[in-house]
Amino acid sequence: MSRTIVLGINSAHDAAACLLVDGEIAVAVPEERLARTKHYEGYPHRAVDYCLRSAGLADLTAVDTVVINEYVKDDTGLLVRQAGFTGDLVVNPSHHLLHAYYAWMASPHHRPAVLILDGAGYHYGEYQRRQSPMLGPPPPFSEMEESESMYVVRDDEELTLVRKRWGLWASSDPFLRFPSLGHMYSVASEYIFGHMMHAGKTMGLAPYGDPSRFPDPIIEYTPDGLVIDTEWITKVPPRSAEPAHLDDICRDMAAKVQAELERAVLYLCRELHELTGADELCVSGGVGLNSVTNGMILRETPFNHLFVTPASGDSGVAIGAALYGHHRRTGRRVRWKAYDNYHGHSYTTAQMQRAITSRDLLVDARPVTDLTGQAARDIADGRFVGWFEGGSEFGPRALGHRSILCDPRPPEMRDRLNALVKFREPFRPYAASVLSEHVGDYFEAPDDDPFMMTVVQVRPSQADVIASVCHVDGTCRIQTVDPDHAGSYRRLIERFHALTGLPLVLNTSFNIRGEPVVETPDDALECFLGCNLDVLYLDGHRITKYVARTAEHPERLVPRLATSLTIRATIGNDGGAATGPRYQCQKKTGHLTTLSAEEYAVLSLMDTRRSIADLAAALPGWTTDEAVRIVADLQERGLVYLARPAGGG
């Protein structure tokens, strides 16, 4: 009996691919994990190849249906045809409909209401041309784009449109503006952090601000629905040069848009409940990543059950596209027994060993028999632990397969993790992975959340106990870990519980600022070497590295420039007169770091052969201790790796 093979592709921002075989996800991956560029935009050729290889398919000729979500200006279908695909090609069904398919079919609910909120879909004219279903009454202008969609699943188990709202783009100067909740939040994020994709940072900053300092409402509530003012951002004073967490306007703006978003989402949820009478709610679209608002839905609306897609952003559209294609081709609705969000392929022992062996001068890898027990002891002893196992998580949340872990008890762990490991802003909060049977002991959580999509209140009696996962407003984003959790992660937390009496660990994604979550063993080792993680667990090995500050003979170690790091010296111009040189290095993420003249001198001499002692000897007047100190600082900032001498000396 032949199989039904469907490929879903999102080739807009957050590009991704998903391969569905007989209604089951065989593999899915965001392009950013493979290209190593966050929010990758365009045809995800690496992700498509990854999916085909993982499923054992030679090329696109083995696929029955391809469903594509793309910008209207693009022609991804042509690229797919040129790659040999001859089957059923579907381009640009309603963007919100694809979000809805993912939310509907991945959820455990049978008759849910479905709410889709994001920045924007595409315009009505495009969908009409493509003969997309479930568009509702035509809007006044064909250029109007999706801003909000509501659906419901009735007894016939078919998705039905309840209501759809459309909007027109207001302007692109000084900000790209559109009347949707997602765009309201994105514009604020662009003002505060310089990019529309930094909504997660805005959510984390919001508790530090006062929304009342922006007294004028952004959203008006009318009998015809929400009216969103797109002009509010034009009335804000120019952005200062201060970091966001030190700038009053930035903090207060974050608080303002968070408060407006919460009120609006709760209003829409109550309205959707009244329109449908559903007891269960599914949420997707970029606004679904606002875990603070998600946490309020069950507490403050009539819905009793909530499912938020783990990849609510546009990478999840690839899964929705594959599901839509399967339903369209077979007429059958997928019903999964469970959804775990681990859609990457697992790497072989040989692949992991090659990654380790290729860095044998940089790391010390030792096999461990009691893997989870040793990792739990490292966490309890205050170490930062990288944890890599199985197939990668598809969404932005690390769920125990590509995670950085540490002890949530010491209050300083959050600040140290932000500064030394993630290299990110000091206000950023962290999540907790908690054994599901103990969640009520520490959190006021109305329901389990295996995908880390909701923020809940920490019980006041426990706030000081788990200080590093308790945000400034007394909340925490949680992942509940069930007994049947895939992989060894549950066992690790159980072992930590046995050692410390605490049934939870701090869990954050395995990446550093500006980089996507690691996908491959090579990615994991590069990230491990480029930050201040203490230990990495990979393929049954406990992996450590050489650290200048703690090595017995640091002067013998050989420093290497971190991967994809560029250093430069520039001479300024002041009215025709040369100014003193400025020294900088640029990481592969684009982030610039200022260097001292001494640091630049050391970096310039690194050649993968000279030891720290050799560098000191090559620099007139330097002592070995000075060179060790400089290299230790550079290593702590993620700019150099340290290797043992090739001869073993």
Image (cartoon, grey):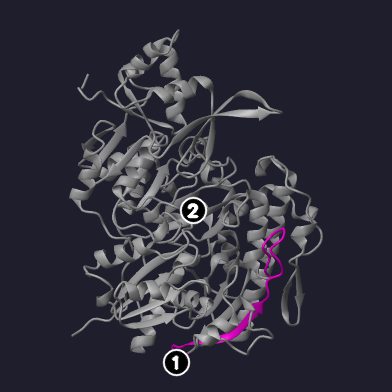
Q: Is residue 435 left or right of residue 164?
A: left
The reply, left or right, for residue 348 in relation to residue 96 is left
Q: The residue tagged with tag 2: helix, strand or loop? A: helix
Q: Is residue 601 visible?
A: yes
Instruction: Give the CA separation, mark 2 to mark 1.
Output: 40 Å
Q: Which residues are magenta?
A: 155-178
- Residue 257 placement (x, y as % from top left): 69, 59
State the residue at coordinates (79%, 56%): 214
Camera-side residue: 105 or 130? 130
Identify the residue at the far front of this view.
576
> Residue 321: where, in percent of width, then height?
42, 76
State which quadrant residue 224 falls in. bottom right
Q: Give the amino acid type for the residue marked by disc 2 in the picture.
A: Asp
Instruction: List the residue tagged with mark 2.
Output: 441
Left or right side of 45 for 263: right
Magenta span has 172?
yes
SS assignment at label 1: loop
Quadrant location of residue 337? bottom left
Work out which quarter of the rendered image holds the C terminus and state it: top left
Q: Amino acid at mark 1?
A: Asp
Q: Which mark is residue 91?
A: none
* Comparing labels 2 and 1, the label whose residue is closer to the camera: 1
- Say which label, 2 or 1, has the lower sequence index: 1
| Tag 1 residue | 156
